[in-house]
């Protein structure tokens, strides 16, 4: 009997909840709150930037609260899709620059007026490009990141390596010296390179003149199976062999900077913010301060750098919002010069070229700013995000790293998959 | 039947009143069922209807934002049925389910039989252990297993190396999909055994002792007693447990998803993951829905077969 009462009570409670949520969504006349989705990088790396934006916004709109909800890269698009379908998407959302095109093409964002935003004439060109679709602006550049080699100066010295490598072959030779010195420990990585780390792997491919895909006559074609790309992938395989990292995980699981902090890593390819992260007092190892350095990834052509992936984030205003002007005001506060300086301080590249001097003046940021001058970007197709989400490049790299397929076979299969996905619906 | 015959002797006026009451009585079960039926209709039938509808539509991100799909007939089904990846995934899922269910049932029953032979305190200890396993939420269990088979710090690699099984330092359990699925099979069977063991143990307690004794007196060996007496008596239980296990194992998702950082490579796709991948990662919700519908149909077929068999066994007793 008790069970039945309980069931009845539960049912009543469920109905009550359903009724209250139903009424909650209809009685929205005056906005008292805006919802912002940021990636958790801001939460861990530059919380002060968020605080500055919220303070500025609150001063303009004392009766509106800002609810910043932190997301993770792995799941935020799934959540965003569900929120769009349910009609309760956030008012502002941070998107990766490679994710923008798919959503702009589908009409997920409101068009914005460029002149409304701070520093809009000096935005980083690469980021601005990722915010435009068919000549309209659908996003505001937030920050960019360039990767460089972060290394242990003390280990390099102990292994008898003088200076930093000037070419890829010299870097590989230096890695051999490191392995000679420290390689008796099977857990030691001369370069930490997990099997799914495609941003690094594709830098090598682009350095050899390879490309992921090219567009010809309105059709995309995957080109990883072309000779130049294969030359790059063969070097990737060599670099995998100098790493003790798992062949089936990526650079964020576990966080490579924290693996580096444990001491058994000679170098890794990381973003500017990963340097201070490795020294973090809670999760990193502050004792490494003074034993770390960075240099841009050396190219196979002596004296040049490899192109780095110009990763970055933009801010969009979903079409479902009812608070567009509030959303725009918050973005303005968030991308002000004062706020952007915080993201640069944390090791990134701010959204405006006027702050580049700030990076160049800091020895811990300068190598990354230099690396950013040569960059590559993913094919600009609305379907590109699907290539990322289908893990095509990751699967190819895992096959190469584990030796389950030859470089050529793995590249061929990935290439045809990329061709198919990019041309879907075209 | 008898009540209808009696009705003939009752005067018309009374009969009407009586039949009205009878109608009320006849309706009562339906009235009582109505809330449950309404809830089931709301939370099950309506979403199922939407799923089937979506499987006949072009439903991508564009349509999602506008809340309106475009009818394209059976194109989604044609596309998955001609997709070799899909058939690989189906085959993988069926094989994986078969292995998991077989191992679960055999080991679960074996442990239940073992429980009968044990002294009280060992039995209590073992049952407690089983219940604890059962009580661990799936996500927690997966994370514990994930630490155990961790590439760098996992206790599995450490133990196997210490036992001189081989050099398992930095052994990657998921580099080879066979080894990876071995881990998942172990994880799922481990999680499923307690339910099977405890249910079978309870059922074994219901087997009349006389039958077993009589068989033994007739000279049957223990294995023959088990096969000829115990199994037929427990058949309804076995059928229910097997069909439930099939349903659970066929739709395995979280274990693989969480263990592989929400980005399993295509070697690890089961039907549930493939449907999720098509829907939420590729934003082809129509295709994802079609895969889900195929999954529902396969499951329905399997359940139907077992339900029929169950009804037949029901008639014998």
Image (cartoon, coloured by chain):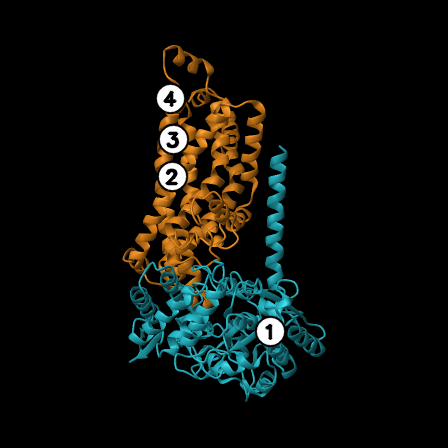
Give the residue pinned by disc 3.
Answer: B310
**10 Å neighbourhood of mark 2: few (<14), some, or many (≥20)?**
some
Looking at the picture, tell me which residue is in the foreground, A31 or B111.
Answer: B111
Circle nearer the N terminus (4, 3): 4
- Mark 1 and mark 4: Cα distance apart in space: 74 Å
Q: Is residue B179 above or below residue A51?
A: above
Q: What chain is colored cyan?
A: A
Coordinates of residue A294 in the picture (x, y in percent): 54, 76
Q: Determine whether, in the image, residue A173 is placed left or right of residue A75.
A: left
Residue B223 numbered mark, or none: 4
The residue sitting at the bottom extreme is A121
Q: Determine whether, in the image, residue B175 is placed left or right of residue A265.
A: left
Q: Determine whether, in the image, residue A253 is placed left or right of residue A2.
A: left
Give the residue pinned by disc 2.
Answer: B303
Chain that bears disc 3: B
Q: Are marks 2 and 1 in contact (CB under 8 Å)?
A: no
Q: Quadrant of residue A287?
A: bottom right
Of the two numbered discs 4 and 2 in the rendering, the one whose residue sits closer to the viewer:
4
The residue lying at 47 percent from left, 36 percent from top is B193
Q: Is residue B217 visible?
A: yes
Q: What chain is colored orange?
A: B
Q: Is residue A257 above or below residue B274?
A: below
- Mark 3 and mark 1: Cα distance apart in space: 58 Å
Q: Are marks 3 and 1 in contact (CB under 8 Å)?
A: no
Circle nearer the N terminus (2, 3): 2
Circle nearer the N terminus (4, 2): 4
Coordinates of residue B111 in the picture (x, y in percent): 47, 30
């Amino acid at each position: 009997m008790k069970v039945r009462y309980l069931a009845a009570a539960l049912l009543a409670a469920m109905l009550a909840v359903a009724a209250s949520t139903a009424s909650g969504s209809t009685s929205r006349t005056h906005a008292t709150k805006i919802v912002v989705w940021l990636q958790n990088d801001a939460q861990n790396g530059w919380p002060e930037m968020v605080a500055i934006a919220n303070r500025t916004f609150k001063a303009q709109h004392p009766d509106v609260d800002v609810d910043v909800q932190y997301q993770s890269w792995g799941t935020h698009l799934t959540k965003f899709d569900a929120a769009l379908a349910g009609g309760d998407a956030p008012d502002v959302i941070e998107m990766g620059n490679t994710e923008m095109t798919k959503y702009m093409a589908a009409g997920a964002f409101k068009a914005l007026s460029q002149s409304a935003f701070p520093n809009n004439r000096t935005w980083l060109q690469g980021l601005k490009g990722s915010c435009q679709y068919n000549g309209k602006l659908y996003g505001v550049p937030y920050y960019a990141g360039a990767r460089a080699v972060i290394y242990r100066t003390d280990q390099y010295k102990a292994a008898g390596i003088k200076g930093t490598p000037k070419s890829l072959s010299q870097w590989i030779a230096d890695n051999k010296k490191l392995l000679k010195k420290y390689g008796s420990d099977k857990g030691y990585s001369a370069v930490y390179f997990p099997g799914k780390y495609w941003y690094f792997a594709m830098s090598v491919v682009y350095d050899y003149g390879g490309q992921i895909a090219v567009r010809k006559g309105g059709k995309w074609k995957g080109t990883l199976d072309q000779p130049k790309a294969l030359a790059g992938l063969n070097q990737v395989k060599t670099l995998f062999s100098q790493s003790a990292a798992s062949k089936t995980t990526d650079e964020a699981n576990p966080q490579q900077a924290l693996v580096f902090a444990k001491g058994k890593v000679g170098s890794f390819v990381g973003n500017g913010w990963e340097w201070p992260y490795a020294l973090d007092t809670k999760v990193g190892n502050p004792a490494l301060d003074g034993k770390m350095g960075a240099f841009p990834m050396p190219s196979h052509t002596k004296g040049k750098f490899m192109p780095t992936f110009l990763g970055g984030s933009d801010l969009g205003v979903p079409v479902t919002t009812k608070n567009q002007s509030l959303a725009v005001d918050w973005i303005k506060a968030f991308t002000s010069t004062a706020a952007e300086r915080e993201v640069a301080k944390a090791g990134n590249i701010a959204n405006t070229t006027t702050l580049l001097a700030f990076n160049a003046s800091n020895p811990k940021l300068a190598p990354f700013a230099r690396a950013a001058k040569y960059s590559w970007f993913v094919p600009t197709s609305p379907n590109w995000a699907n290539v990322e989400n289908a893990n095509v490049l990751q699967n190819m790299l895992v096959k190469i790293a584990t030796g389950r397929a030859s470089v050529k076979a793995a590249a061929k299969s990935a290439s045809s998959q990329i061709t198919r996905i990019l041309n879907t619906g075209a | 039947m008898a009540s209808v015959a009696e009705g003939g002797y009752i005067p018309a006026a009374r009969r009407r009143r009586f039949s009205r009451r009878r109608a009320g009585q006849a309706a009562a079960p339906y009235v009582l069922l109505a809330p449950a039926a309404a809830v089931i209709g709301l939370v099950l039938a309506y979403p199922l209807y939407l799923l089937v509808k979506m499987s006949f539509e072009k439903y991508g991100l564009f349509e999602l934002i506008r809340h309106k799909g475009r009818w394209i007939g059976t194109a989604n089904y044609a596309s998955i049925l001609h997709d070799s990846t899909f058939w690989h995934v189906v085959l993988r899922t069926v094989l994986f389910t078969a292995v998991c269910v077989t191992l679960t049932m055999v080991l679960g029953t074996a442990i239940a039989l073992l429980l009968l032979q044990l002294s009280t305190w060992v039995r209590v200890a073992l049952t407690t252990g089983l219940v604890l396993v059962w009580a661990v939420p799936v996500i927690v269990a997966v994370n514990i297993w994930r630490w155990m088979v961790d590439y760098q710090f996992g206790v599995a690699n450490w133990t196997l190396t210490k036992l001189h099984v081989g050099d398992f330092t930095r052994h990657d359990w998921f580099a080879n999909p066979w080894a990876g699925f071995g881990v998942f099979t172990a994880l799922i069977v481990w999680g499923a055994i307690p339910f099977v063991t405890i249910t079978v143990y309870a059922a074994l307690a219901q087997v009349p002792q006389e039958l077993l004794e009589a068989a033994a007196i007739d000279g049957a060996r223990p294995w023959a007693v088990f096969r000829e007496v115990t199994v037929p008596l427990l058949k309804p239980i076995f059928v229910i447990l097997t069909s439930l296990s099939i349903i659970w194992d066929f739709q395995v998702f979280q274990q693989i998803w969480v263990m592989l950082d929400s980005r399993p490579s295509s070697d690890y796709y089961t039907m549930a993951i493939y449907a999720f991948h098509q829907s939420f990662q590729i934003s082809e919700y129509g295709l994802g829905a079609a895969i889900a519908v195929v999954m529902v149909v396969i499951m329905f077929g399997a359940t139907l077969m077992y339900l029929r068999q169950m009804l037949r066994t029901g008639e014998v007793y």
